Amino acid sequence: MSIFASIEQAPTDPILGISDAYRADPSPDKVNLGIGVYQDESGKLPLLAAVREAVARIAADPKPLGYQPMDGLPGFAAATQELVFGKGSAAVASGRIVTVQTLAGTGALKLGADFLNRFSPGADILFSEPTWDNHAAVFGGAGLTIRAYRYYDRATGGVDFAGMCADIADAKPGSIVLLHACCHNPSGCDLDDSQWAEVVKLIGEKGLIPFFDMAYQGFAVGAEADAVGVRLAAESGITFLVANSYSKTFGLYGERIGGLSIGCADAAEAKRVLSRVKLCIRANYSNPPTQGATIVTTILGDSELRASWEAEVASYRDRIRDMRGLLAEGLRANGVAETGFVTKQRGMFTFTGLSPEQMQTLRGEYHIYGVDNGRICCAALNTRNVEYVAVSLAKLLK
Ligand code: LMR
């Protein structure tokens, strides 16, 4: 008898499973608004000009593909620190921030979770309610204890800031607070600058550890403005973690490239922390791959390529904003009274407020694939599908 005989079929993934169902649907009307992947007006995943050029440069000068150091490609950490913490960051200059290359954002979250659980086993981690579907699997799987703080206010379609602060203030000292740096996934509702200042101060006063998930730097306002919470934490001197991803921002989804940064008390502590993070890496996958890190480091290290990247991300932002405008217009034209949420929310996602049953109806009857929590990806809308989506959504929202 096989030792696997009693294993039951796992449920499908709430986000990636939607793409599988979409692929299997023969309908010509089908629209995939499930996964958070940016698509251009023609419905295709774009290859950024800066990435195309970096790949060409790398191909023109092929190098032997040896092992990378455990913490990643030399030069990658410094380039990532400049992007995440800003040029001239005093925290970076002090040497108290450790940055390592990771297997994209999810890999950074898992590495950070493993590291935290190693030194604070079973510690509480507070998630926004709601949060990205995979957070619970990543952090729960690492052994941390999942708690929640209030965040999205269904009544106002905004952030329940008082509730958020009250729940964070109630957390046990030493708890970790997971924060979406920008473009909150799934709600699209972000804190403003003064709210960030308040939250970072509160977290510091209560002896908590903020862990920023930054998968969309540049998709809300711009690379600098979107990092305001992260930078406040870094410059305030508290202990913190940041997982940043290059999947969406550089269109490098399949390269699995991101970074984990840990803010320590001082450079000496950072050195010891890095030695322990390397042990976690060694025990998981030994060392990371080369190509994605080389692409990112090439772009960030060349002022022309970096400017090209920023301009292209700005054009993504603009296109998403235009699609949000068209969706809101289409909803209004089809009898939905309250559409402000569509244009107010930021980043790739719109949180429709539809129930799981309604999202299933959207799939079953209209072949429009969103996530059961009510999230749809506006970055996959285009001028050909937006009207159909608006008409279909309006039937459920009215
Ligand atoms: C999403 O939220 O759709 C993306 O981050 C993709 C994923 O891995 O879930």
Image: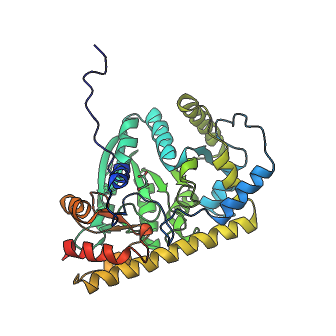
Residue occupying the point 27% across, 34% down: 9
Is 194 placed above or below 292 here?
below
- Report if residue 268 is visible in the image: yes
Is 3 in front, or is 142? 3
Q: Residue at x 56, y 59 (%)?
A: 251
Q: Is residue 62 left or right of residue 396?
A: right
Percent position of residue 74, x then y: 72, 44
Front one among 194 and 283: 283
- The answer to which image quadrant residue 157 occupies is bottom left
Q: Horizontal and vertical percent for residue 244?
A: 54, 54
Query: Where is residue 208 drawn, in percent x and y?
Result: 42, 50
Residue 95 visible (yes or no): no
Residue that lies at the very extreme toward the top in this rendered image: 1
Rendered image coloring scheme: rainbow
**60 relative to 253 in the view: left or right:** right
Using the image as rendered, state which of residue 230 and residue 264 is in the foreground: 230
The quarter holding residue 122 reads top left
Q: Quadrant of residue 131?
A: bottom left
Left or right of 100, for residue 110: left
Residue 101 position (above or below residue 307): above
Q: Is residue 229 shown left or right of residue 3?
A: right
Residue at 55 percent across and 49 percent down: it is 254
| Quadrant, the C terminus | bottom left
- Given residues 361 and 110, the one toward you in this image is 361
Dividing the image into four equal quarters, which quarter contains ligand 1?
Answer: bottom left
Q: Position of residue 228 (x, y in %)?
A: 53, 66
